[in-house]
Image: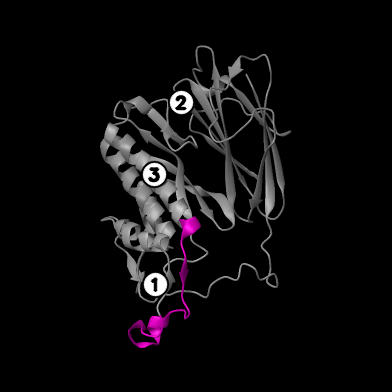
Amino acid sequence: MVFDRISLVKAYAALKIVELNDGAVKDILFNKTSYYGTKTIDRFDRLSDLAAFINENYPYQYFDPDCQCAVTELDSIWLPLSFNLTLPTDRYATFVNNMRGDFESAQGARLNKISVTACQSIFKTASELQRLKQNYSCFAYMINQNQYVNDCEYVELIVNGAYTSLVEEYYPLSRHPDLQVSQLLVNTEPLNLEDESGPIPAIYTATTQFNVASGQGFTFPGPIGVSIVNTPIFTSGILPGNMHTDNLLLSQAGGFNSVSDINIQLGNDPILTGIVSGDTMFFAKGDINVILIAGDISIAWTHYVIDHDITQEITITN
């Protein structure tokens, strides 16, 4: 859980700075990258919810560096994709990870420079963690040696510089006054990733297609995520019970006055009209969230995977 703890606490500390300087942070969306791939995690409504999640699932763990490997194959790196906040001027702002190592927002110029620097530091740390995760090595001849051998004197760990840097430089920085829960590390038996005798988890593909009628004056100033208009978006390798979000940003000449300027239809369902900014509409396959951002409209479709592949067409008209 070392990579999980470091990346989550780094994100929490940065968002705490944003909240103290600019206003309450909410609707925090993460993805996490592990051995099985990358998946999107359900949104945290408030920063306090994120703190409670870290305390409950990723407490600070004490371990003996002489005979315990602190990292396992299950470790993940967490990265925030977006969050919302209300600025002191009562302007509602959405900040989105633009996949180039920075956050973007139509209200970005109003954000305190200290907050901007804090958010940028999340990506710097994540980049270094990704490098360490690819290169670290820690091998223990005995699992939990410290539990039954005096002072871990049986045999030393075999580690490299990347692992040493991770546990000696980065992990101590994952302490935070708001995240005080701690526990002793107990290693589990390592996964045999090459063992084909065990069950292989089923994975599925979710397909989303945003259909935008031509000739209606819509433009697309830049993607939130990697959406391509009128082209299917395939999200493969999703484990059962997990979620993924696809996004689209719409603009038009003169800007939108309201999200009610557009109509949305999911597949052959009735057309959704009179939508209010910030509304989340729930459906059997997932939910759709629509937000007005400085004259542009952000549409986010979060699809849930149960036990089969899913396909969803979303048609936007005015």
Q: Residue at x 65, y 52 (%)?
A: 237
Q: Position of residue 81 (x, y in %)?
A: 47, 41
Q: How many marks?
A: 3
Q: Which residue is mark 2?
A: 293
Q: Which residue is mark 1?
A: 185
Tag 1 and tag 2, C-beta contact below 8 Å = no
Residue nearest the viewer, comparing 197 with 23:
197
Q: Is residue 284 left or right of residue 175?
A: right
Farthest-out residue, right: 268
Residue nearest the viewer, comparing 95 with 281:
95
- The CA span between labels 3 and 1 is 27 Å
The secondary structure type at the circle numbered 2 is strand
Farthest-out residue, top: 254
- The CA span between labels 3 and 2 is 27 Å
In the rendered structure, which segment of residues is drawn in magenta? Answer: 133-155
Q: Nearer the viewer, mark 3 or mark 1?
A: 3
Q: Which residue is mark 3?
A: 124
Picture quarter with the N terminus: bottom left
Q: Residue at x 39, y 44 (%)?
A: 124
The secondary structure type at the circle numbered 1 is loop
